[in-house]
Image (tube, rainbow, N blue to C red):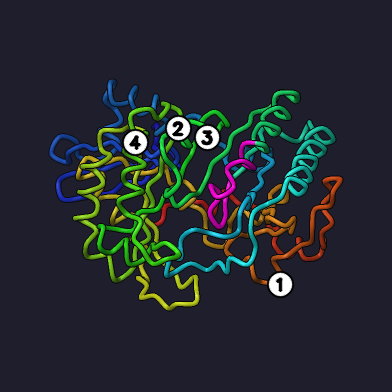
Amino acid sequence: MVKLNKYVVKIEDGNKVILFNYYNGISIKYSKIDFKDVGSFISQEEVFDLLESENFLDLKVFDLQKEMSRTLQLIVLVHEDCNFRCTYCYEKFERGAMKKETGDSVIRYVSNEIENHKEDYDRIQISWFGGEPLLNLNMIEYMSLKFMDIAKQNNIEYSSDITTNGYLLNKKVFSKLIKFNINTFQITIDGTEDYHDKQRILKNGHGTFNRIINNIQSFKSVIPSETCIIVRTNVGKDNFNDMDRHIDNLIRLFGDSEQIYLSFHNIGNWGQNQTDIIKQDIKIELLNKVIDKGGNSAPILWNMVNESICYASKKNHYVIGSTGCVYKCTVALYNAKNLLGIIDKEGNLRINNKKEELWLQDFDEKKLKPVQ
């Protein structure tokens, strides 16, 4: 008997059952009145064909372990300052923009690594991070074109993503980034205007909600089909009770775009200010609300991974700071164990291998499980 694959979770809601695919973010809903169980639902020929086409069935399961092991992944902090001062942020903003000299070192590292170990890689994945990466847009452009050329010369895939607060992401900037193969954008909106503008403020204390909303609206109609815009909400006790209104507002604003998805994460005590956190994981509950209201929920495969497993545990993954410091993790930037070393002018990683070994561990697909 054909079963659902391991990336699909069943969510029951009264007389309805929602099948949510964590890998691609697609949800399918059916009625318990019409089908007594999942097996009887799958057995329908038209349903089977639909589930097969959308990768719901245990036929050809995506091999996450192989995908990660054959990808050279770098998180590049092109600017370590930020134009925001979010109340829960963990960053100290002690460094500024990445200089061309450091950018060239990173480019040399990628070129040397791919050319010397071509048989080990199928893909280069660059994540632009900060601080606020769009404060150094010229460096993103310069490095992206170099990375794209390296991938082309070595006949491997190149993709990239960006985590941005969205304040500088107008239509002109968005169109430019698309040309650099940036195909996933994560932008945070932390609730309705009143709440967001208390949490995610500019350096001068002014609000940012309307500027971000207007920016997304400006390029909403020109988002390429292969591009994903993830609107993230960080949720704590202060804004949890207002999530229904927040979700309704986001669906009203962006629900007509198939490329804009909603995502939710628990706020943690990341920064110096203590925040009232919610202990239980709220993702599934809010995901259910989004689906029920007809919205798009983000593909959140990464939420299936055990908390102790992350990108930092992979050998072929590094975080490169704006001054050339080499780390394993973005959240633990100021932990001495996280600083592995530096990247030199020739593109060599001068790192402490013993420190790196502390971060590495086997990636076990058996630990992949939906967060309930």
Q: Given the image, on which type of amino acid does mark 3 rest?
A: Leu
The residue beneath circle 4 is 218
Q: Amino acid at mark 1?
A: Ala
**Mark pair 3, 1: CA separation:** 34 Å
Q: Residue 335 vs residue 11: left or right?
A: right
- Whichever of labels 4 and 1 marks the residue nearer the N terminus, that label is 4
Residue shown at the point (26%, 58%) measured from the top left? 193
Residue positioned 28% across, 26% down in the render: 47
Tell me the residue at 37%/47% (across/down): 231
- Whichever of callouts 4 and 2 sits on the residue coming sooner in the sequence is 4
- Magenta segment: does it hold 133? yes
In this rendering, position of residue 361 left or right of residue 91: right
Say which quadrant the C terminus sits in.
Answer: bottom left
In the rendered image, residue 287, in percent from the top left (x then y), is placed at 30, 50
Quick check: 279 above or below 255? below
Assess disc 2: are there few (<14), some (14-19) or many (≥20) residues with their C-alpha within 10 Å of its C-alpha: some
Q: Nearer the N terminus, badge 3 or badge 4?
A: 3
Instruction: First in sequence, mark 3 or 1: give its number.
Output: 3
Q: Which residue is labeled 1 in the image?
A: 336
